[in-house]
Each structure stands twice: as structure tokens, then as C-alpha cells.
Amino acid sequence: MGDLAEYKEELASKPAWKRKLFYWFHVFNFLQPWALKNIDGSQKLNQYGMFKNYFKTSVRSLLKNKAFSGINILGLAMSLSLVVLMMLFLGEIYSFDDFHENRDNIYRVTSTEVRGNRGAVVKQATGSYFIADQLAQEVSGVGEVLVMTNTFTKLDIGTEDKAVPVDCYYAGSTFFNLFSFDLIKGNPNTVLSLPNQVVLTESVAYKLFGDQDPMGQLLTAEMSGYLQNGATAESDLKNGVVSGIVADPPVNSHLRFEALISLKTKERAIIERSLDHQTNPGYNSNLYVYLVLNEGVKPQQVEEAMFNSLKAFNTEREDNPLIHNLQSMSTFITSDTYHSAGPTFAKRKLLIMLALTLIVLLSACFNYTNLSLARALRRSKEVGVRKVIGASRFQVFCQFLVEAIVISSMALIIGIGLFLLIKPFFLSLPNPSARGFEMFELAISFEQVLYFFLLAILVGLLAGILPALFLSKIQTINAFKNSLQSKLPGKISVKNILIVFQFTMSIGLIMCAVLINDQYNYTLSYDLGYDTEDILTVEIQGDYVDVLANEYAKLSEVEAISKSGWVLGVGGDGLTAGMFFSEDRSARTLSLLNQIDDKYIPMHNIEILAGESFYEPLGRDVAAYNILVNEAFLKELGLGAPEEVLGQQVLYNGEKIRIRGVFKDAVSIGLTKKFLEPMVFIQTNSATDYKALNLKIASNDIMGMLTKLEEVYAKHDQIHPFNASYYEDSIAETYKAEKGTYTIISFLAIMAISISTLGLLGMVIFNTETRQKEISIRKVLGAGIGNLAVLLSKNFVLLILLAALIAIPITLEIVERQVLNSFWDRAPISMMETLSGFFIVLLIGLFTIAIQVQKAARANPINSLGSE
């Protein structure tokens, strides 16, 4: 504006109109970009310069203190790699079923009822034809309603030329209206509207028909893979026709299938057999019922309507009412109560993993906080100088926060690299709840990388805020007096609190890993109550069991052969159960039921307490009317002692069956279930009842023996792969969930102890450096390595001992009530296992301290005392 004033004076002699004209000409002529100065922009420029200075100062500080910077960066990188993994994991978990257009309004009917004399409350994600009809016709606010089977039907679907084994669902006609699966060919309204219609996935269609058009092609189907020998299986699907092609279900779908068969196909069989399944509300164990709620309709309104529709039914069974509720689609995968036939991941397990990841992250943050507070004495002079030359407390605060954020950002880059290294390990961990399906990909997108850096900033703020507050409040006069203390009220050192927390977490995780591994090994070596040594189980998926057994018997490596419906102690897909009643119907029990032949009991050396076993084959036309029961079965029905029940009859499927013998209780389906369940052995002459061929093997050439068995198997079943395993391997597979949990916790324990050790190393280095003159004086006065070791280690040993006193009782309680609560028989806990975490942390701590003591002992005292 001063330049413009000069122009005004020059123009004073000119006429008024010329003065105004020239004046405004020069005003606008000066409106050039270089002459404009925006006040806000100037402030932003100053802020940019300020933060640029903060950044440069932070980098210089990191380079100047390489050891401490390396410890902080490595510790944070290790923890951030886990956080990146968990963020991707959570993102994929909660993205399940997000491709369905009506995801937020899709619900599934659940059932709750009391079963058996024990009054067990059974909760299932199932419904009935009856309730589906009520929802579709009588309940307002409900859109589409879908009924489908809740478990896979394993069929061999094919043409005259070939067949492939597929997992199928029977589904109602509204399937593609309710769900948003990609139907490539076919009309979504009609592809499942008629009996015998089949919708194939792309992959199955290609296996069967190659590049030919599959639409309208005829299909045959058999239950267990008999197409190769011409036998006819009893399947609800007789002569199918391809009515549609659907894209393979995506990885993030709770429903996985290879084919869909119209529910009309199964309903036709129900009508032909004159069954009341479609009108009986109690037939609610084998069906899913899905529905879409209209906008504004609350689930509670529908639940109340379902309750009212069951009043008449529940009046007849007052002691065992049936209650239906609705389950939101967002909880299908993570439900701890209701499970899907497809992949699941229990919410409880998810929360445990989140908590452990948070613990590891906090441990790394505490490392930074601890080391920063420990170095406050050295950096106090830096703060004093800054304040002398005019820096405000807020500017000093920002300086140290920026330094923390720089460290966390550098750690994130390294952490992403570590994540890429541990990703294959994590994906390879056993996850039985996935049921053989792929659940996770853990792919990183550009958008997620941005979120990761926001996380790094947050972690930097979390780790750096306490040191920044402490250092920024230092008064200038105290900054040069070496009189700083980082204490809470009551003279409790913040550093000591953080160290105790870190070691508490490390000791707890190590203890947890040791106890889980001990339980796992205890379970594998548990006395099941029967002989399993050298018994190989071959999976049977057809009616060729007798022919196969005869051919196996010719092999010199096979000593004995028996048949069963499922593998004792393991269970599996062929596991069966039935409801048994006392003869007067005063008591009932849901009992495990295993179909066996006469060779099964002797091969497994199962102890018979009373009566006799099955000693000869059951004739082809002879009905099975004799059973063997265990002690738990007698207790449930209140039948008395084993000797008293021989010859007594019980009711099964409306028919009377005689108790032939009583066998000793044994582990039925694993220690993670109630392993002393009521159990019944029944002899059968139906080849289709046998799903396992048990071979007593006498051979040292395992691979050669398995090759021979597979060659014989391939002659009778060209469709299904040869699956065989020893009992020990099958039992180990049963507990792979516990093995996976042990592996995850062990990995986290290693991470936690590594981070804690890095923190301890940093503290010992700093402690040694700050006490170098004291150490030198003591050496001059005759102190040896032992004296120095005690001097530098006693405080840390006391902190580790305090951490152990906190960690041990808490860990024992958590392991007992949360981690191993699914086991019915626990491994005894010894003193060594209880103190395992403490000893490991103590040894690592002492080793870390010993390295620095050795270094301090070798240092020349003259170098430290020469300036004094």
C-alpha cells in the first residue's frame, strides 16, 4: 500500500477523473501472484516449515541414537506386523456375505428346545416347513422366505460317461431371489421350481460337460459313488436335468456348494412316504429357513408372531417348548451358538486373538515409552536449549510426538514386510471350523495401506504422548540440573510399572503355550479304553465294502479286518446318533450309535462287563435286534447294574431291541466333547451302513503297504480318492483346533518375549551407560564381574519376580476357564509348568544383562574417569 501512496502524490496535479483512473489502473496492475499475501496461507507455510523442522530434527535424533532407535523400530515393527494381519483378518471376517444385496435384512430362523433326561438345552440354526409356511403366509412384514437343507448331501452326479462327487443342498425356488449368487444361466424364478431340477456350479459343469452347453442335459445321481459298478443308490434325485449354471460361491460366502437340487425333489419323496414333515413343527433339525424382513420391520415382531403360531404345538409338550428366534446374517460366521454347514470362526476365538494382538502392540508401545522416559535426563538439556531460544511447551510437545510418529511409520514399513513373511504361516494353520473351505486370502489393497499409515500415526501418538508430556513440561531451570524423575504419586516409577506389565504378559503367554501343549500331548496319549495300535482306517464311500475287505484279507500285511459306521474316538461325517426310550417310555436318551460287524469288538479289545459280544456275522435276511450298550447308557435310562439289564428291551425307532451286553465306558468322540456319552453298538448286515474299514497292519514298509491298498481300492472306486489313516493320525486330526491355538499362542509368546527382551536390552544399555562412572569407580576399588552383575541385575530380577507373582494366578485362571474349558479331562499341572514362564523370562533377562555386564567389565575405567 505504501507504493500506491507514492503514485497518488505523483498524480495530485492531474484532474480528478485522471487521478482516479490512473490510481485504480495501478491498483489492479499490482494484483500479481507475487504481490499477494494470504494471511492463512502464510500460517500454513509457517506450519509446514515447523513440521519440516520437526521431521529433520527427529531423523537426526534417530541417527544419533541408533541403538535405541533400532530397538524401538524393531519392537514396533514386530507388533505392527500382527496388527496388519489382524486388520486384514477382521476385514475379511466381517466382509462375509457382503455381496448379497439384502444382507442387512436377511435373517435365519433358529430353534431352542430341551432334549433328553439331562434337560440339555439344544440351540440350532434350524427351522421347519411349518414355520416357513407361517412366515410366508401369516406374518406381515416378511418378504422372501427360503427353505433348504442344512447339511450337505454327498452325491455322485454324472452322465452315462462319467460322474464326479459333489456337495449339494436341496433348496427352495426362492433361493436366487433371496440370495445374490451369480446365476450365469437360467431363470432365477424357475431354476429350482420343479422336481429333479439341478443347478451346477461352473467348475462342476466344466468337469462333466467340458465346453458343451450343459443346459437341459440329463443327470444321474447316487448317494455314495456306485456309478462305477452299476448299483443303484437310494437317492431322492432320480433323473435330474440341468436347469441353471451358477458361478462358484465366493470365498466370503457362508454357503458353499457345488450343486443345488430343487427342494421339490425331496418333498416328493416325503409325500410318497406319507410323512408329516411338512406340517409337523417338531421336524426342525434338518432345515434352514431364511427370510428377508421388509424395511422398518423389527426382528422382535416376527419372533413374537412365531411364538404365537407355536402355542398349540407347545401346549402338548409343556416340559419341552420349542422357541424360534431370528439370527442376523452378519452373525452367521462369528456365532458361538449357532453354526453353519459352511465355514465359521467363533467370536470367542476372535476376541482372544484380538486381545493377544493388543497386548503385543501395547508391549511395543511401552518399550518406546520406557526408553524415552529413561533417556529423558539426556534429552532434558536439549529441551532446555529449545526453551531458552523461545520454543513453547506446545512446540516441544509436538517435536517429540512427530519423532514418535516417524519411528512408528518406519516400523510400519518393516512391519508390512514381516507380515508378508508370516502370512503363509498363518494361512497354513489348521482351522477345523472352516470345514475344509478356504476362508481367508489376506490380500492388501492400496486403500488398506492408507489405513495402515493412519494406524501408524495413532500408534505413534499412543507410544509418544507420555514422553512428550513429560519432556515438554520440564522447566528451563531444571533442564540443566539433572534432577528429573518420572514417577507417579507415591513415588512409583512409571518405567518399572511398564516393565512389570511387559514381563507379566510374556510370562503369561509362555505359561499359556506350555499348558496348552501339555494338554494336547496328554490328549494324544490318553487311554481311550480300547486298542488302537497299528489299526489303519480306510474310508468307504460305496457298497463295495465286502468285496474290498475280501481282497485286503489276501494281503500279507493285513492281519485282521473289521467294519464300522464311524471311527471310535474320532467321529467325523459318518457320526450317527439315535433316541432310545426305556420299555415303558418313562426315560429317554440321545445316544451315539455305531454300526459294527462281529470282528470289531475283538480287534479293538473293548472290555465287556456283562453279557457277550457279537461272535458271528449277521445273516443277510436277519434283522438287527441285539445291541451292546455302555455304562453311561444304563445311567441315562436308569436301567440298573450291567448284570441286571441283560435281556432287557429298549425302544428305538418304535421297535423293541434287546440288550445283549454291556461294555466299559470309553472315549467315544474325543476329550473336547463329553467323551463318556451314552453309546450303542449295533450289528448290521447292510453294506451301506459301513463307512470305515479297519485294518490291523503288520508291516514296516508303510509306503509300500499303502500303495498296495490304494491299488486295490482303485479297482472298486474310480470316483473318490483313497483316504486312509492310522488311529493316532486320525485322533491328532481331531485335535487340530487345539494344535492351531497352541501354535498361535506360542507365536505370540515369542513375539511378546522378543519385544520385552528388546526393551530390557535398551534399559540395561542405558543403565550401564548412565552408571559407567560408578561402575568404573567400583572396578578401581576391586569389584569383580559378579559384583557388577548383581549391581546391574538386582532391580530387573525383582521386577521379573513381581511380574511372575501377577502373571501365574491370572494365567492359571484364564487357561482353566477360557482356553481349555472344552476338555472334559485335564492334564495335571506340575510346578515346573507353573513356573515355566518365569524361568524362561528370567533366563533370557539374565542372559541379556550378562552380555552388557561383560561389556562393562572389559571397559577401561580410565576412559570414564579421565575427565574427572
Image: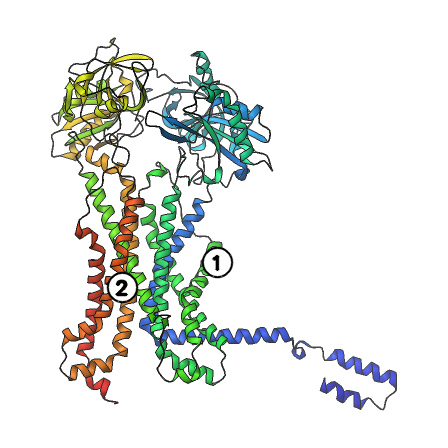
Identify the residue at horizontal 82%, vertical 88% (top origin): 11
**Front one among 708 and 383:** 383
Which image quadrant for residue 379? bottom left
Q: Which residue is mark 2?
A: 757
**86 is higher (above) or lower (below) than 778:** above
Quick check: can you spot residue 216? no
Q: Residue 280, position in %: x, y?
A: 46, 18
Q: Residue 763, position in %: x, y?
A: 29, 70
Quick check: can you spot residue 131? yes
**Numbered marks: total:** 2
Q: Residue 528, position in %: x, y?
A: 18, 32
**511 is higher (above) or lower (below) than 578:** below
Identify the residue at horizontal 29%, vertical 70% (top origin): 762
Judge from the rendering whether residue 581 lies leftward or rightward of residue 833; answer left or right.
Answer: right
Labels 1 & 2 near each other (Cβ < 8 A): no
**621 is higher (above) or lower (below) than 252:** above
At label 2, the amino acid type is: Thr
* Residue 450 badge: 1
* Residue 153 badge: none
**Front one among 439 and 459:** 459
Q: Quadrant of the C terminus?
A: bottom left
Instruction: Give the SS element for disc 2.
Output: helix
Q: Residue 750, position in %: x, y?
A: 27, 56
Of labels 1 and 2, the one closer to you: 2
Is disc 2 surrounded by few (<14), some (14 to 19) or many (20+) residues within 10 Å? many
Which image quadrant for residue 839? bottom left
- Marks 1/2: CA–CA distance: 31 Å
At label 1, the amino acid type is: Leu
Q: Earlier in the sequence, mark 1 or mark 2?
A: 1
**Front one among 765 and 260:** 765
- Residue, far top: 621
